[in-house]
Amino acid sequence: MLKVLKLVVLASFLLTSLAFVFRNEPASSKSVVPAKPGKVNTVVIDAGHGGKDPGTRGRKIREKDVALAVALELGRQIKQETPDVKVLYTRSTDVFIELGERSAFANRNNADLFISIHCNATLKSRSVRGTETFVMGLHKTEGNLEVARRENSVILQETNYKQKYKGFDPNSPLAHIMLANYQSAFISSSLRFADHVERKFQSVSGRDSRGVKQAGFLVLWRCAMPSVLIETGFLSTPDEEDYLSSDDGQEEVAASIHQAFMLYKKEMDR
């Protein structure tokens, strides 16, 4: 009990310190924060990983390639049905983009929604399947923490990552708790969109949904808008890898997210 209390106190101290750091950052580095979530005019689609960072791997495909294909197809569908919506990509080719730059790009462009596309994997079983959509928040299970650790470990490939991310250690559970408490202004809208995504995965493509979850992801850390990270399936499960590597599978995944986007946009525009 005493150990838990000490961790809570330390986390509180770190959160206060982090808030002080961000309040005292140079104006040029601060996020552009809109007053509140509203109409969806600009969406940033983030294809996870890229370049020297392949992400997780299946038997024959890499996460970075699936993420890019789904991201581009999602953007195409959005632009086709709602040409008035501005669609931007953090990357449209196989290049490495630092995690901090992904959210900074969305902030600079005053995005109304940030969608980060990924693939899952586990060493525990080759039969685990299904989709998961994450929003920024506290880890409810050890499994959520493991996903966040894996995705956040990308920063180890960046130069001077300790300085860029205020000493963040991707292997520290306490650091992830600190992150999870940082972004709360857009949690309600993020959860709304995430719920639509998981429901559409079930109704549009008959996928197994593992639900909406919360975890501390660096890519969502400084997003000044509703934001989600979507795990589209498990590359460690052979039939899911086959599905995600196929053109039909990628188009269906994108269609599910697109329908969720249209529903969310309709609600927010009202």
Image (cartoon, grey):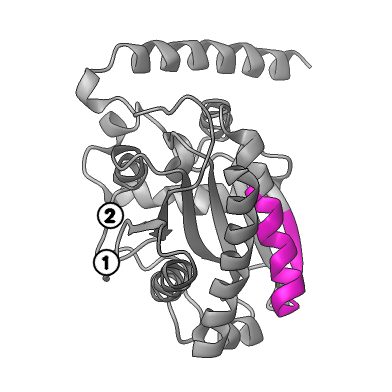
Is 195 magenta? The answer is: yes
| Residue 75 drawn at (x, y percent) | 42, 67
| Residue 9 drawn at (x, y percent) | 62, 11
Along the viewing direction, whichever of 168 and 3 lies nearer the viewer: 168
Q: Amino acid at mark 1?
A: Gly
| Residue 159 figure quarter | top left
The rendered magenta stretch, by its main secondary structure, is classed as: helix
Residue 78 visible in the displayed image? yes
Is 199 magenta? The answer is: yes
How many C-alpha atoms fall within 10 Å of the one at disc 1: few (<14), some, or many (≥20)? few
| Residue 2 drawn at (x, y percent) | 74, 13
Residue drawn at 26 percent across, 66 percent down: 51
In this rendering, position of residue 117 left or right of residue 96: right
Q: Quadrant of the C terminus?
A: top right
Q: Is residue 190 above or below residue 35?
A: below
In this rendering, position of residue 261 left or right of residue 51: right
The mark total stands at 2
> Can you identify the residue that label 1 sits on?
51
| Residue 162 figure quarter | top left
How many C-alpha atoms fall within 10 Å of the one at disc 2: few (<14), some, or many (≥20)? many
Dots 1 and 2: beta carbons under 8 Å? yes
Residue drawn at 76 percent across, 72 percent down: 203
Residue 214 visible in the displayed image? no
Question: In the rendered structure, which segment of residues is drawn in magenta?
Answer: 193-211
Mark 2 residue element: loop
Residue drawn at 40 percent across, 58 percent down: 84
Along the viewing direction, whichever of 174 and 138 lies nearer the viewer: 138
| Residue 167 drawn at (x, y percent) | 36, 28
Q: Amino acid at mark 2?
A: Ile
Q: Is residue 32 above or below residue 49?
A: above
| Residue 69 figure quarter | bottom left
> Can you identify the residue that label 2 sits on?
97
